Image: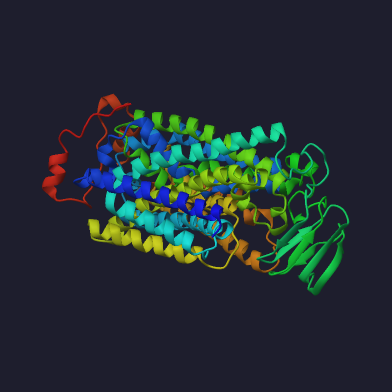
């Protein structure tokens, strides 16, 4: 291992040790049901907001956004906008009423609002599916980080993340998870802000090493020096001008071993294992579908009507999918009342807005300093490679080590939140509701996600996360919004809505995966289906509920009053948490649960 690789490995080890310490230290503080499950519902708003932000800022936030901006330019700015706007929608329509409902998980809410045990089981199944779709990109990001930075096998990254997460979650419960995730937010903010500011100063000063032409010119990005790229997975490339290069491998279905000239009038298929060598100053080829020049990269919505549809669909998924993420909503149950839940959400918006300033800058700098990633399509690695490309030597290595700490912090925080919240759902609905069952469920969920993440498929982290948001928006969003604000929703309407929305998104996902292996034929409404699936789910929920209005639960009026009455009136009755602790422990903890601090 080189000195730089040793530094990166030490950085990752330090993050793991601190995470383990926080989990074990907090494990000694919880002693019964409410500590393990929801930290006695006395978590301060600011700490809870940092914890929410810590687990929300996942691999897509740290790696995917910068990679998407490197590839797509202005069109990728909708990712951070959508991620933040989702919390505005959550704050306005869901956070306070959901906390006042007294439920602990989404299935708890669905059962309490609709008075149906069957719909609870179905909601639990959807929760597990959303969690798996969200977990897999985190582990794929860990695989990418290890293969990019370290000489070890790629599977070591996902395995390490899963191991650390299980130790933290199984030992410490919600209190340990909250403390660890609040720490991870501040670590991630430091790890992305400091390197970004340093790199911007270098760019404004002398430009650093290897800077290509500026982004203001309409010309394509160019390689500043002789560059050799090895293609690990098959890729289809395009160029904006006749381009001369050396190719060794298989190009356009034929063997290539020497100089070739690529024409902008056709696409060029490059097989896995092919080596491409470019002279300095050569315009950079890009993956088909990405802007080939800086003019198109800077202009939003340059692809016509279908690109506009894709943008609206992405925003729909991100804005409405946040409220359906199980690991995010579980955080609001640790607040003592609805007012504190809304205050937590406001703080989250501020913390996320501060963080997302920096991936945008890193994505723009990557276009100048690591344009060779556009050739392989592995643009998610831009954040990892950028510091040493701008500052070769010890300075760049230090900045890269700081970024590596933040990257692995992102993997650990998002994964631990998902495993904790969804393991609670599985153990409550499918097992006899004991601590041992919670731990078994956590292990099963983590290992399942690990197995899927190790399948041989080149991921697009931002796109993969967007699919998880689309599934959440198409299933839980209609049930939450209508269940909170319309007393006419019935169990049949909710079941039909979640079935239609969920099946539509999963079908689109299956077709998109098949398209990846068979030539990339999937249109944009398959890659980004939310603009179709979310309205369809709402319409089905309303129509089926109207058709089955006679099955409306008798408890709906009392439940609606509990959700919408002001906190000070005292209508909130928290749901019992029977899954952990003996009855006498729960009775003891029901008195003097602690005073909430702002």
Q: Is residue 598 left or right of residue 351?
A: left
Q: Position of residue 114 (x, y in %)?
A: 34, 47
Determine whether 227 is above or below 568 in the image. Answer: below
| Depth check, front residue: 86 or 164 | 164
| Depth check, front residue: 246 or 166 | 246
Determine whether 78 is above or below 437 in the image. Answer: above
**Residue placed furthest toward the bottom:** 255
Q: Position of residue 563 (x, y in %)?
A: 34, 34
The quadrant in which the C terminus is found is top left
Kindly identify the residue that appears in the image at 63 percent across and 55 percent down: 527
Specify the quadrant of the image occupied by residue 76.
top right
Determine whether 510 is above or below 295 in the image. Answer: below
**Residue placed furthest toward the top:** 568
Kindly identify the residue that appears in the image at 41 percent across and 34 percent down: 49
| Number of marks in the rendered image | 0
| Depth check, front residue: 553 or 382 | 382
| Depth check, front residue: 2 or 117 | 2
Determine whether 79 is above or below 449 in the image. Answer: above
Specify the quadrant of the image occupied by residue 373.
bottom right
Whether residue 107 is visible here, answered yes or no, is no
């Amino acid at each position: 291992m080189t000195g730089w690789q040793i530094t990166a490995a030490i950085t990752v080890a330090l993050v793991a040790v601190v995470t383990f310490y926080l989990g074990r230290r907090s494990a000694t503080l919880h002693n019964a049901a409410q500590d393990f499950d929801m930290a006695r519902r006395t978590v301060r708003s600011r700490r809870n907001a940092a914890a929410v932000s810590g687990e929300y800022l996942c691999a897509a936030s740290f790696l995917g956004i910068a990679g998407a901006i490197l590839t797509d330019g202005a069109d990728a700015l909708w990712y951070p906008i959508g991620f933040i706007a989702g919390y505005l929608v959550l704050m306005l329509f869901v956070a306070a009423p959901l906390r006042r409902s007294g439920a602990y998980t989404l299935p708890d809410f669905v059962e309490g609002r609709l008075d149906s045990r069957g719909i609870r089981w179905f909601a639990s199944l959807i929760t597990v599916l959303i969690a798996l779709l969200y977990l897999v990109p985190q582990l794929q990001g860990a695989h990418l980080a290890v293969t990019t930075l370290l000489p070890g096998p790629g599977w070591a990254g996902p395995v390490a993340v899963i191991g650390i997460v299980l130790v933290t979650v199984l030992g410490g419960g919600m209190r340990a998870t909250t403390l660890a995730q609040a720490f991870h937010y501040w670590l991630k903010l430091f790890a992305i802000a400091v390197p970004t500011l340093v790199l911007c100063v270098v760019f404004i000063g002398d430009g650093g090493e290897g800077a290509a032409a500026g982004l203001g010119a309409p010309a394509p990005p160019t390689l500043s020096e002789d560059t050799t790229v090895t293609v690990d997975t098959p890729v289809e490339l395009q160029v904006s001008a006749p381009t001369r290069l050396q190719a060794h491998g298989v190009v356009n279905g034929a063997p290539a071993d020497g100089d070739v000239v690529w024409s902008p009038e056709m696409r060029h298929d490059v097989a896995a294992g092919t080596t491409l060598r470019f002279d300095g100053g050569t315009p950079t080829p890009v993956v088909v579908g990405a802007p080939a020049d800086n003019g198109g990269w800077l202009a939003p919505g340059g692809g016509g009507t279908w690109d506009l549809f894709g943008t609206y669909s992405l925003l729909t998924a991100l804005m409405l999918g946040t409220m359906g993420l199980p690991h995010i909503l579980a955080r609001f149950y640790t607040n003592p009342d609805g007012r504190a839940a809304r205050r937590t959400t406001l703080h989250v918006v501020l913390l996320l807005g501060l963080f997302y300033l920096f991936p945008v800058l890193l994505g723009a700098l990557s276009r100048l300093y690591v344009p060779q990633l556009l050739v392989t399509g592995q643009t998610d690695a831009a954040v990892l490679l950028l510091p040493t490309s701008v500052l070769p030597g010890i300075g760049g290595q230090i900045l890269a080590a700081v970024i590596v700490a933040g990257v692995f912090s992102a993997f650990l925080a998002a994964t631990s939140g998902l495993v904790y919240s969804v393991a609670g759902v599985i153990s409550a609905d499918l097992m006899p509701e004991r601590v041992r069952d919670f731990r078994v469920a956590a292990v099963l969920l983590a290992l399942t996600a690990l197995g899927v993440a190790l399948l041989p498929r080149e991921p697009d982290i931002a796109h993969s996360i967007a699919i998880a948001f689309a599934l959440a928006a198409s299933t839980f969003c209609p049930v939450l919004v209508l269940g909170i604000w319309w007393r006419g929703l019935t169990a049949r309407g909710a079941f039909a809505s979640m079935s239609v929305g969920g099946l539509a998104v999963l079908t689109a996902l299956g077709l998109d995966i098949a398209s990846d292996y068979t030539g990339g034929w999937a249109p944009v409404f398959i890659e980004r289906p939310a603009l179709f699936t979310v309205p369809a789910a709402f319409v089905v929920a309303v129509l089926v509920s109207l058709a089955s209005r006679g099955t409306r639960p008798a408890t709906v009026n009392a439940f609606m009053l509990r959700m919408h009455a002001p906190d000070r009136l005292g209508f909130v009755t928290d749901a019992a948490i029977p899954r952990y602790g003996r009855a006498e422990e729960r009775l003891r903890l029901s008195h003097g649960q602690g005073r909430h601090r702002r």
